[in-house]
Image (tube, rainbow, N blue to C red):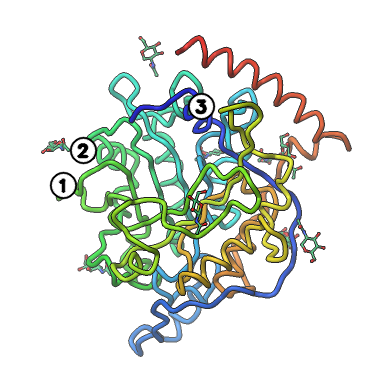
Amino acid sequence: MRFSLSHVLAGALMGIAGVSAIPQQASSAVSSTSTSSPSPSQTSSSDQSLVCNNSPVLCDRHYNDITYMGAHDSAFLRDASTGNSIAGNQYLNATLALDAGLRLLQAQVHNENGTLHLCHTSCGLLDAGPLENWLAAINDWVVGHPSDVITILLVNSDEVNVSQFAAAFQQSGLSKFGFVPQSKIEWPSLRTMIANDTRVVSFITNIDASSAAPYLLPEFDYVFETPFTVVQLDGFNCTVDRPSNAGTASEAFGSGFMGLINHFKDQEITAGLIIPDTDNILLVNSANTTTTGNLGLHIQQCNSQWNHRPSFVLVDFWDQGSTVKAADNSNGINQVTGRTNATNNSSSDSSADGTNQAREFGTGALIAFLAATLLMI
Ligand SMILES: *[C@@H]1O[C@H](CO)[C@@H](O)[C@H](O)[C@H]1NC(C)=O
Ligand SMILES: *[C@@H]1O[C@H](CO)[C@@H](O)[C@H](O)[C@H]1NC(C)=O
Ligand SMILES: *[C@@H]1O[C@H](CO)[C@@H](O)[C@H](O)[C@H]1NC(C)=O
Ligand SMILES: *[C@@H]1O[C@H](CO)[C@@H](O)[C@H](O)[C@H]1NC(C)=O
Ligand SMILES: *[C@@H]1O[C@H](CO)[C@@H](O)[C@H](O)[C@H]1NC(C)=O
Ligand SMILES: *[C@@H]1O[C@H](CO)[C@@H](O)[C@H](O)[C@H]1NC(C)=O
Ligand SMILES: *[C@@H]1O[C@H](CO)[C@@H](O)[C@H](O)[C@H]1NC(C)=O
Ligand SMILES: *[C@@H]1O[C@H](CO)[C@@H](O)[C@H](O)[C@H]1NC(C)=O
Ligand SMILES: *[C@@H]1O[C@H](CO)[C@@H](O)[C@H](O)[C@H]1NC(C)=O
């Protein structure tokens, strides 16, 4: 794939954030996907104590009938480790995201001198290190959380052969948890996946399915996405953007696709230069369903238009706003256990004008970033 400068920058800079948690009644728990009741064999008294993905309610729900809140560009941090790079889309890393209840991690992978690295647009801009190391950290979390099912979504930017991904998954330990779907349409319950200890669903773009690593799934065989690079609060919608062969949303669901909502807002600060819109962070990452641009509203609209519960949602700066609450509302759950609230130390350290400081820093970093980018090109 080739990118224009503006696309390179847009890709590098997507992000958004928001603050505040709004307690809210479950508002978009409708779903027409399978809601089969548990079979008698699955409801022994010991099983009834099982908590799946933080809620007993989710154990007997099928994998594709659950909304997973996801961290967009989850490996690309805007924190001390990257010098607060504005190419970072998250303040807190993927382990903290999982701790907080997110169950989808997305990132971009590049071929850096023959090794797969997590890089944002280019390894010269933001290199978050070898994929294998990051997967190993995820593996540690999965090992320590035996009744959680997570999803990984990797963008294979350099169209590397699936066998290289398989090597990284194997070395990290994560491959042993890899789930292999038996059907595109019939997904098992979380209970079944947990019982089988096949608790990691891994989607990768630009790969062919491989019999050597059947748990590495070509994303667009299974998932369709709504548009991204949204720059207006009223620009979020539920239209199928990718893959082009999925058809309408109705057709896509008819052939077994799951829906992914891209919900991060950018702003164009000068012609062709698009960066994350942090000014509207509170609104965009809010579980509220009242205001145009709200995360909760977007999920509710897609649920209603699709007549299916959205499976995946991607947000930037997930610790801002009430992103996990939005997924809980979509899933119709309100009693959850086993989550820890994220601590954003940089914010607790800053005084009342911390936001302005962050913005000023952002401008300086932007200039440095632009200079670096132009030099590279
Ligand atoms: C997140 O940071 C913690 C603390 O530094 C570290 O232990 C963990 O491995 C990190 N997780 C990832 C996915 O990088
Ligand atoms: C890849 O090679 C280039 C050119 O030799 C070098 O600048 C870069 O640091 C290397 N990257 C890694 C991750 O080793
Ligand atoms: C990937 O590599 C395998 C061998 O490791 C090969 O059989 C396959 O054709 C390759 N796939 C592509 C798309 O090049
Ligand atoms: C569970 O594991 C068994 C044995 O590996 C396998 O045959 C079965 O297909 C798995 N079930 C699901 C739903 O993955
Ligand atoms: C959804 O947004 C995309 C991108 O802005 C746009 O092309 C498409 O027409 C929109 N869909 C509807 C139904 O408005
Ligand atoms: C969410 O809605 C509540 C009540 O309608 C309102 O008080 C709150 O300010 C809203 N929060 C955001 C971030 O819009
Ligand atoms: C996390 O935050 C929520 C909302 O502020 C609060 O109700 C809950 O008790 C907190 N959980 C922990 C473990 O601190
Ligand atoms: C915040 O600081 C506390 C205490 O030093 C530490 O335990 C925690 O890991 C830090 N959180 C993050 C996200 O860095
Ligand atoms: C988290 O830290 C970032 C970076 O300092 C800051 O911009 C953001 O406002 C903080 N979050 C909260 C909730 O204050």
Which residue is label 3 attached to? Answer: 6
Question: Which numbered disc, 3 or 2, marks the residue that appears first in the sequence?
Answer: 3
Quadrant of the image containing the N terminus: top left
Q: Position of residue 50 (x, y in %)?
A: 48, 74
Which class describes the residues within 10 Å of circle 2: few (<14), some (14-19), or many (20+)? Answer: some
Give the mark nearer the N terminus: 1 vs 3: 3
Label 2 belongs to which residue? 163
Q: Is mark 3 within 8 Å of ligand 5?
A: no
Between 183 and 97, the residue placed more toward the observer is 183
Asked if residue 307 is positioned above or below residue 97 in the image, the reply reads below
The residue under the point 80% across, 40% down is 348
Q: Identify the residue under disc 1.
A: 212
Q: Which residue lies furthest to the bottom in this view?
A: 40
User: CA gap, disc 3 to disc 2?
Assistant: 32 Å
Is ligand 3 closer than 8 angstroms to the Cβ of mark 2?
A: yes
Please determine whether, in this image, residue 268 is positioned above or below residue 282.
above
Q: In which quarter of the image is ligand 3?
A: top left
Q: Which amino acid does label 3 sit on?
A: Ser
Distance Cα–Cα, label 1 vs label 3:
38 Å
Which quarter of the figure has residue 356? Answer: top right
Which amino acid type is shown beneath numbered disc 1? Ala
Horizontal side, residue 62 vs residue 313: left or right: left
Q: Percent position (x, y) of residue 269?
A: 66, 29
- In the image, 346 versus 185, the foreground residue is 185
Q: Is mark 1 on a helix, strand or loop?
A: loop
Q: List x then y, in percent, for residue 342.
A: 67, 49
Disc 2 + disc 1, Cβ < 8 Å? yes
Q: Identify the residue at image location x=41%, y=34%.
A: 133
Mark 1 beta carbon near ligand 3 (under 8 Å): yes
